[in-house]
Image (cartoon, rainbow, N blue to C red):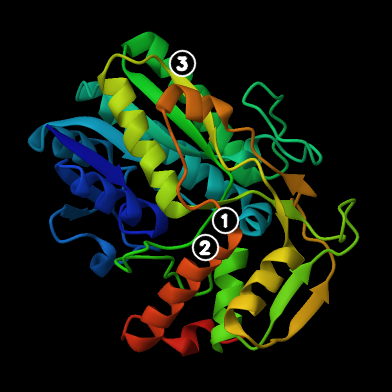
Amino acid sequence: MSVLVTGGAAYIGSHLVWELLDNGEKVVVLDRLSTGFEWAVAPEAKLVVGDIGDTSFVRSLLRDHEIDSVIHFAGSIIVPESVADPLAYYENNTCKTRALLGAIIDAKVRHVIFSSTAAVYGGKGLEPIAEDAPTFPESPYGRSKLMTEWMLSDASAAHGFTYTVLRYFNVAGADPRGRTGQSTPGATHLIKVACETAIGKRHAIEVFGTDYPTPDGTCIRDYIHVSDLVVAHRLALARLRNGGDNLIANCGYGRGYSVLEVINSVRRLKGDTFEVRLRGRRLGDPAAVVANAELARRELGWVPSYAALDRIVADAFAWEEILSRSNRYDPAQDAR
């Protein structure tokens, strides 16, 4: 049996592919390569270029490769972009996932793991958020993900597959072995942007909002190392295969860092300063989002290995240096 990873040529998905292969799994990647890269897929995996919204194509893929589990990353992820173009997010994240679920049901796939987000909670203040907190997403991105969670619940009850929803907090860092990392030109993730600025790929970094009700006035987020996150997925897969029931679990460390704390971590690593431009708030950005991830630790047996902010930043920075030495990065695409 094999595992299908949708969006497996992009940032988090490519890390999971390596994690699964390292642990003896057979992996098929489905990606339309809109934000992913063929070179980012581990050579031992089977890459199929296609769209999750093509139900008949995906149904055949699932059957031909004897897929028993689907781990679903494919989708759009930028909060401000979702505010500007909400219907595109409902199409790509919600409608196409409904089509994917139709193929999964038709092919009798047994297990699904879904890449969700802490954005389903909205802004909750400085206290860590548990899974039973009310869901009040403040952006079309968050709402599109929550809709998929509802679809999974209803479809599982009707058709008998089991699923796990992992609600990510802020994913950052890169593979410590330097095999893959965040590589999309024009990325908006804070640690990625700060590292690009420090290495000279951007002229400056912008800080959106300095008047939030936080200790230094900037937004606070719970940053999770991508390598810890993909281990949680592997453990979630093992739990489902061993008869585990449906689960929704947060993936974070329970410790938040402000935008300025992240920038200072990058400055400590780089040893010099770079330009920081202060801007007004962006629509859809809550003041603080921090995880209570005790459920993932208890149910999955998940023990993070890379929880220090400076370690996350160091691995992210090392990947930027790898990109700079390779032909995989075109600075003209990302000039600021």
Amino acid type at image mark 3: Asp
**Distance between the alpha carbons at the discs numbered 3 and 1:** 38 Å
Picture coordinates of residue 151, whole percent (x, y): 47, 24
Amino acid type at image mark 1: Ala
The residue to which callout 3 is attached is 154
Around disc 2, counting alpha carbons within 10 Å, would you say few (fewer than 14), some (14 to 19), or many (20 or more)? some
Upstream in sequence: badge 2 or badge 3: 3
- Contact (Cβ within 8 Å) of mark 2 with mark 3: no
The residue to which callout 1 is attached is 308
Going 31% across and 65% down the picture, which residue do you hit? 177
Picture coordinates of residue 119, whole percent (x, y): 64, 42
Q: Quadrant of residue 134?
A: top right
The residue to which callout 2 is attached is 311
Picture coordinates of residue 219, whole percent (x, y): 77, 56
Q: Is residue 101 visible?
A: no
Mark drawn on residue 294: none
Going 50% across and 70% down the picture, which residue do you hit? 314
The residue closer to the viewer here, 304 or 134, is 304
- As displayed, is residue 42 above or below residue 292? below
The residue closer to the viewer here, 97 or 156, is 156
- Contact (Cβ within 8 Å) of mark 2 with mark 1: yes
- As displayed, is residue 313 above or below residue 25? below
